Amino acid sequence: STNTTFTLPFTLNEDATRLTASHVTAPNATADSVAASSASVYTATVTPTNDGSVTLDVAANSAQDSAGNGNATASRLSVIYDATLPQLLSSSPANDDVDVGKARLRVSLTFDEEIKVNGGNVDLIRLADREVIETLSLLGDSVTLELTVITAQFAKNLSQNEVYGIVINSGGISDVAG
């Protein structure tokens, strides 16, 4: 899967000419800048349009060898394009829960799709002054990941009558497409 524009090589089994962007069919994407990088290899820049399946086809007779023979129909290439960031579905404790700081705070965040941890930290902050109360490494032993759920086990007890929040640094998590 991918979440960005990508370059795709087309490798022919012999030297050929005439392959252009008009020969590449790409529903849910545009394929442009088709150019020969050698006599038998062409590359195309593929820009997906919407999340979902992106298929690429090259029809028969799109390229020709030196004898004028056209190529056979190419095997279909299919990738999944996913540019939508994971969305938080729920948290435990839930937003506005009270009396959660009497024991070690365990926070579970459930997302709408499978996620991966890229690194960085998750901070427990006091919202009144944005003070960081505790920082955990997203790759450390106190943070676990199970498909769509990240769980962080904080060691600090919280003060009564305070409001706290969780902050994950930008880029710390992403969906599996990146």
Image: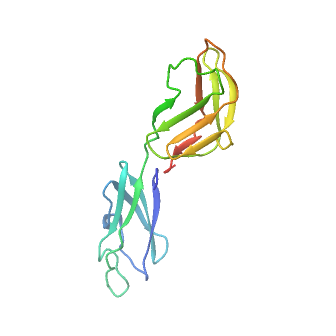
- Outermost residue, front side: 103
Determine whether 109 is above or below 16 in the image: above
Determine whether 90 is above or below 144 in the image: above
- Outermost residue, top side: 161
Nearest to the observer: residue 108 or residue 31: 108
**Looking at the figure, which quarter contains the N terminus?**
bottom left
Q: Residue at x 49, y 43 (%)?
A: 148
In the rendered image, residue 56, in percent from the top left (x then y), is placed at 35, 64
Determine whether 121 is above or below 147 in the image: above
Q: Residue at x 35, y 74 (%)?
A: 74
Nearest to the observer: residue 122 or residue 177: 122
In the rendered image, residue 92, in percent from the top left (x then y), is placed at 52, 30
In the rendered image, residue 134, in percent from the top left (x then y), is placed at 69, 28
Which colour scheme appears in the figure?
Answer: rainbow
Residue 57: quarter of image: bottom left
Tally the marks: 0
In the rendered image, residue 140, in percent from the top left (x then y), is placed at 68, 42
Left or right for 85, reference 166: left
Determine whether 167 is above or below 72 in the image: above
Residue 73: quarter of image: bottom left
Nearest to the observer: residue 12 or residue 120: 120
Q: Residue at x 43, y 42 (%)?
A: 84
Nearest to the observer: residue 23 or residue 108: 108
